[in-house]
Every structure is written in C-alpha cells, then in structure tokens.
Image: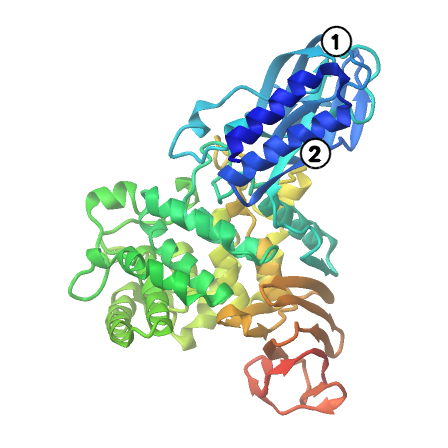
Amino acid sequence: MNRFRIEHRVREVLRQCGDNAPRVFQRVLLALVIVVGVQAAAAPVKLVEQDPVSTIKLPDGGYLLDFGRVAFGNLLLAPKSGSKGELTIRFGEAMEDGRIDRHPPGSVRYYEVKAHLDGRDEVIAPPRNIRNSTPPAVLTPPQWGVVTPFRWVEIEGWPGKLRVGEVKRRAFFDSTWNDHAASFQSSNAMLDRVWELCHYSIKATTFAGVFVDGDRERRSYEADAYLTQLSYYAGDPNSQMERDTFTRLMKYPTWPTEWAPHMVFMAYADWMQTGDKEWLAQHYDYLKTKTLENRAGPDGLIHSTPEQMGSHDVVDWPPGERDGYVFTPVNTVVNAFHLRAVEDMRQLALALGKQRDAEVYAQRERTTLVSFQKVLFDEKTGLYRDGIGTDHSSIHANLFPLAFGLVPEDERAHVAEWLAQQGMRCSPYAAQYLLEGLFENGESKAAIDEMIAPGDRSWRHMVDSGATITWEAWDARYKPNLDWTHAWGAAPANLLPRFVLGVEVRRPGWSEAEIQPHPGGLRFASGTVPTPRGTIRVSWKMTQKFTLLLTLPNGMKAKVLVPATEGSRGVWIDGQAAMVHREGAWWVVDKSVGGRKSIEVR
C-alpha cells in the first residue's frame, strides 16, 4: 500500500471514530501519517513532539511557552478537556522585554496566526513564506504543514488553565542523529558552551533532509553544504544527508566562483569518511568540471572577467567581511581554491586507479603553484597579495593558502603568526578556514581565543546573546538581513573535535585515524567522536607533563602525535617507553596504536 492510500485510510478511520476514539489512538494514527510521509519525501528526517520547558501565565491572561531552544516545526494543540474557543498564537525566535519580539531584525522569525479550538487535536502552523517554499528552495512534505524556526510561543484566548501536554512543538530532525554520540568538555566553560551551541545547530538545521543555508531561502549552497558536512560528521557518521545534498547541488548549482570547488571538497570528504569507491566513481566525471580549469591561462592561473570579479568571485560573504580585498583579474583566493580542488582531484583519481588523470592533475598543480608563488607572494612582507596588480594583503589572501597547504613550509609560521595578530576580520564562513590554518600551524591558542573572544565577532557573542542555533553573520550590524539558523556558522562543531581532541581521519573509511591533540592553553579536554567504525574516546591533561587516554573502536589503528612538553625526552605507552621521533613541537609515535591506550609524555 503506498503512502497516499495509507494516509487516506488513516484519515477515514479517524472520521469514523470521531470523538469516540481515545485521544492516544488518534495521535498514534496521525503520527503514522506523518512518519510515512516523512519517509517517502525526506527519508532522513523524523518528527519529535516536545513539551515546553516552561509555561508562564502573562498579566493579560495569555501564556508564554518556552521550548528551551529554537527548532524548525509547528504546534500541536491537544486540549484534554475538550475546550473550545478562538485563539491568537504567536511564534518567535527573539524576545523583547519578556515578550516575543514582534519586530525582530533581519530574517529572524515572528508569525501571528488565528486558530479555532474545537476540542480536537489540531496542528497550528504559521503562514507560508513564498521565498523559502518555491524551488530552488528545498520543499518539506506538505503533510507536515508549514514549519518555521521558533523557540517561544504566546497563546491568547485559551479557555481555562493550560495543562501539561496540551500544547506541544512538533520539531523535525535528522532521524539518525544521536544526541549522545558526540561529546566535548574542556577546562574552559565558555568553550564548552560554544561546542554545545554549534553541535545542536547542526542537528536543528537538518529539518529539510538536506543541508540548507538557513530559513531565509532554505536553499542548498555548496560552501554551506561542505562546512555543514564537516560538522555533521562530528556528530553523526552517516553520509546519507550529505549525499542527498550533493545530488541536489548537481541539479541546482549556485553562482559564486569559489562555491564550485566546494563540490570537490565534499566528494573528497565523503571518500575519506566512507572509503566508498562506487559512489565516488559515479560522480568523478562531474567533479572534473568543478576545479575552475576552464578559466586557466597558459601559466595555470585562473583568470576572472570584469563580470566575474564584480558578481561571482566571492572571497567572503557578506561583502563587508572581505577585509578591503582588492579584486583583480588574477586573484589569490580564487586560485587558492583551484589549487586545493586540483590536489583533491589528484587524490581521488589515484583512489579510482586513474593513474593518467592523477599525473595530469599533479603536473597542473606543479605548474600553477609555481606561478601562484611567483606572482602573488610578496617577498618583502612575507604575505600574499590579493592579486596581480595590487600590493594589498587581506587576511583572506593569506588564510586560504595557509589552510590549503599552499604556503611554502619555511613561510608558514610567519603567515600564521600574522593571521593570529589580525583577529576575526572575516565572516563565520571564512573563520572555518582561518582557524584550520591557525590550528595546523602552531597557533592553537590564538584559534581557541578567537572562538571565545570578547566583543561581537566570536561565538562567545552568540552564546552571550542567547543564541541556540548559530547565526549567518557575527551580528546584525554586519549583515542586516541575517538569519539565526545558519549551520555554516557552526565551525567549532568540527574544529574542536578535530584539533582540541585531535581526532581526524587519516585513511579512507577510518581504517586509520590520526590523534593529535592541540591543547592551545587549555588544561584538559575530553570527549567522544563517532565514526563509521565506532566511537573514538579521548581524554587528555596538560600539567608539567602531557597525559592522554585513548580508546579506539575494534579494528581501527591510529597514528599518534602528542605535544613535546618542555624538557620532555620521550613517550610512554601503558608504562612502556615507545619508539618515537621528534617533528617540531610534536613527539610522533613510530608505530600505529590500537585499542585502549594510556599515553604519557615525560
């Protein structure tokens, strides 16, 4: 029996039962309709009914319900007493003087609806927003009703006392998400709150079954999708939602220049996460069109037309976050993305046994990198210029080459140190790459400090402002139409497990992990990281020595690198001296480890 016949039959049964059907039975049948619909239209998503965490009687006789955190959904009214009446219901994301803000900034949501309470269960939803409910927006199944992000609800006109269970939020989340699969704790309470904000942000924005850019458009964008993918993996190792997003982006590609190479990044991340050659092979030829190679000149560098410079080359978003970037026909950021995509394609070609393609990509990378370094790097300042024809060096012209491994090894420390001194002069999007570069190049403390810095350009500002889902921009004064439900702003959800806990995939499919904790001034940190092979558990402490407790899933090995504390002479594993060698600030364990290990730097 297909979904539509099931739905028709369930509703026919409800009509026949009328008021004689027990309320629980009615709601089970209604839930069946929703679940079947969800599975047919958006397999990864499930409905969760939530009670408010608090209900307050207002001076005017109405009620204020707080659901604790923002989620995408609508309301279920289930009056136990068979109450009837005319209601006014307000949905909101923001508060003002103890009431829902009826005039919130930007794309922050507020809706007011009228409803008739007739003693039966009823779904109450806000009006349809045409901007996020017509293609290429991602459409949610019609049987859900309209969904919107909200935390608070005001109800006017409820007859008598509002009882527990009579109003529930119907929220929609990824069906495979396990709230307890990932965890993070550290010696810094604010950093822990930042992780919790970002971790929940990924869960809350899975309502559409694919990764979308927030509520204003509900559209999949390549850059948003890749950043969300990284953070999603840190909470749920399943790859289905990422792949569904990838498929959608093949049908609805977007306009920014640098967004196209993000498709290569997504496929490379999928390969490392899953080790699935079959899926990769199916998309390989398509990926070859996403490196920007069609815009390359004889020297390998990517060229931009005036139109592309004016409206397609993004650098950062919103435009005010570009740190004064000077656009030129050959610019550093676009070429950095090209080089990173070419290197990823070389690796993917090797994975598929396409040796000739791999050689072509390797040669292209060598040629372009020589030109890139020759014409875009300023030997006097030790920094990259924004492009040919300007001496201006923005942080973007340097953070992307650093994150993508393009900076010559003997120049990386200088570029990283310079970036650490500049502060957060970029958007939450570019912050993903800025902080990656800092963590990977000896500036871990600066990376952590940026996350929790005072002022309005950090995740601390979101936490202090009461956010429960990350924002599209640091503040409304940097993007007046920002929304408060943007997963690309959740970078710490992947950065903290990858760098502070130090857990990264080393070989495709997690056959081998890399464990390299970056203390960054913290005294301790611990947590769990889910992988397709099982959970990795990490707990470390930094005193006068460094100690690490590590538990790997059965069958997984890990390369281990630990901080070479001052005066240390080696590493002991389970009380036995290990064979190690020194690489800069790290002791590197020569043999991969497995199982549960106690590791100590002495």
Q: Is residue 98 left or right of residue 513?
A: right
- Residue bearing mark 1: 84
User: What is the crowding at mark 1: few (fewer than 14 residues within 10 Å), some, or many (at least 20)?
Assistant: some
* Residue 307 percent across, percent down from the top left: 22, 42
Crowding at dot 2, Cα within 10 Å, few <14 / some 14-19 / many 20+, comes out as some
Give the structural element (helix, strand or loop) at label 2.
strand
Residue at horizontal 57 percent and vertical 73 percent from the top: 513
Secondary element type, mark 1: strand
Q: Identify which amino acid the numbered label 1 is placed on.
A: Lys
Disc assigned to residue 581: none
Residue at the image point whose x is 57% and y is 42% from the top: 45
Residue 37 vs residue 328: left or right?
right
Residue at 74% from the left image edge and 28% from the top image edge: 25
Count of marks, rendered view: 2
| Residue 222 position in % (x across, y down) | 40, 48
Residue 16's quadrant in the figure?
top right
Return the mark for residue 49. Answer: 2
